[in-house]
Image: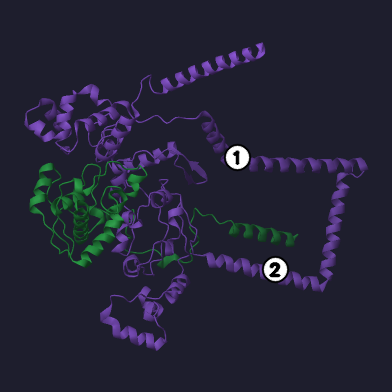
Chain colours: A green, B purple
Amino acid sequence: MKNLKILIALVVFVSFISCNNKRTPQLQYMPDMYESIPYDTDAEKGLNNKPVNRPPVAGTIPRGGFPAYDIPDTPEGYERARIEVTNPIEASEKNLEKGKQLYTIYCTSCHGEKGDGNGALVQNGKFEGIPNYKDRDINAGTIYHVIMHGKNLMGSHSSQLTYTERWQIIHYVEQLRADLLK
Amino acid sequence: MKSVALHSKRTLILLKSFTIILFFAFSLSSYSQEVDEARQQEGKKLYKSLCASCHKLDKKLVGPALGGVEARREREWLLKWIRNNAELRASGDRDAIAIFEEYNGSAMSAFPQLTDQNIDDILYYTTVGDPKPKVDPAAAEVVATGGGSSTAPSWLIYILAAAIVVAFLMIASLLKQVNELKGNTTPETKSNLKRDVQELWEGVKQNTFLKVMTTIFLLLMGAYVGFGTLFKVGVDQGYSPLQPIAFSHKIHAGDNKIDCQYCHSSAKHSKHSGIPSVNVCMNCHKNIAEVAEGTVVEWDGVTYGKAELDKEIAKIYTAAGWDPEALEYTGNTKPIKWIRIHNLPDFAYFNHSQHVTVGGLECQNCHGPVEEMDEMYQFSPLTMGWCINCHRETKVDLKGTEYYDKIHKELAKKYNVGQVTVAQLGGLECGKCHY
């Protein structure tokens, strides 16, 4: 009878470990050093039980960062950007190369590889009416304004790109536009 | 001869009635109105390329809904407005100024390049709408049965299992009856069985060889099971928690070919690849409130269709505080509580930018075929052995590191290889990841 109990125990044990539930994480052995004492990024509760990821105080400039873009998202602001905002970095080969790389990640889905408004999302009908760059009267300032604030259906892409990256993309977009206008 | 005539007459009647039915079907489907398909197509093409980024036919988008706009405005006014609405407003047209004010002064682009014919075609399209897909009833039926058969297997399995259980029960009861008929009563069979087992057990106990073999087998089994269990401790390969939104990487990264870094934009600069904030979702979903017809996602063993998936998109709107009817943010936001899958223990340092930007690795190297996953899961074990293995095998592309040329050459000479690996550059040193 004792043997039978051991057998049952073994069967139960095996079935426990072989039944691996993918919805729950695995057992951890002494997880003292697994969990950080400082707050984790994206953690739900940080200081004063508020989420860790919170918007910075208005007007914050990160180290090595640049002053916030303060031209408002209005038709007048758009025209102001056209005159006031210029590209601070040069259109070097390196910047264009980097711009192309970034353009491929962040823009091609809609604007297409050539900037003709024929990206993958347009081709499969998810987005419609993406303009061809050559049909729009744009310059570096207005492109920057649109990346920061979005325009019509396009949302703001400022959170996905850094200051320098935006300008690298703009160099590449201007090159694409020049090619399209030829 | 007569019969033939009769036959042909019958056919004629049949044909006639058939054409009448067809005619009715067609005229019903096109609202009893002849549609000039060429103009419709031309208008649609222009509309899709020029207007659709701000206007929908049936709904407000950036600008007002355009379906049936011809009935609301005069043609002359529309022509002027579309060509150059700023000029029309400047001329003091009250309607033009009113609509401009209604949409908070967002100016519509001017389209001076359009001819009268172009604009008429566009307006014609806004009135007649999209061409109605001609639904072939036979094809629809095939689709329906096709859908049924795809769900059939799980049903079948349950039914078969039930049938097998029932069959077993029947056989058992039959055997019992046979035994009873033979004159064996139940208690006796039980004691028979017990006696047999006991005899077997005595035999085994006396057989040393069997004893030894059994012990070895049990020990091996125990070791296998024990080690198997211990090796799984803290290794979450295959972990796939149920996320709060039925988000499918297959649709986004696979079908729509959106780059991983579009959403996980911090991977290129930072330690973390990051979960995109809701504003990134809204970059597209401000426009896309409904999935395309026929989109399916396998979610928690259930196939989600359009009805379910549209509700999932609505969850983003709740999170972002977006009112899809009024098309504006209410400011009433609610964070989405995604559940983290890939999580290294805190004593191991890992940096995404080092691997993505410097090493130029594809995300799939570690995360597996994400573009095929409806439900995201952890593809790699993320154990130390797994890290080290890759560092030992990966040869480093030393292009663009001229400053270190000398030391790289010396290292290659030292290890007698053409191209050094990550490990040979110091990628195995404890302090690189544990400090």
Kindly identify which residue carries mark 1: B152
Q: Nearer the viewer, residue B432 or B227?
A: B432
Residue A85 drawn at (x, y percent): 10, 54
Residue B404's disc is none
Q: Position of residue A144 (x, y in %)?
A: 17, 53
Query: In the drawing, does residue B19 fall left or right of residue A123?
Result: right
Amino acid found under the numbered disc labelled 1: Ala
Q: Which residue is mark 2?
A: B218
Vertical arrangement, residue A79 with respect to residue B25, above or below:
below
Q: Spatial distance from mark 1 to mark 2, Cα to Cα?
A: 42 Å
Three-letter amino acid code of the residue under disc 2 = Leu
Say which element carries label 1. helix
Is residue B118 visible in the rendered structure shown here?
Answer: yes
* Residue A112 picture location, percent across and down: 29, 51
Q: Nearer the viewer, residue A103 or B224?
A: A103
Among numbered discs 1 and 2, the one appearing first in the sequence: 1
In the image, residue B325 sits, relative to residue A115, either above or below, namely above
Number of marks drawn: 2
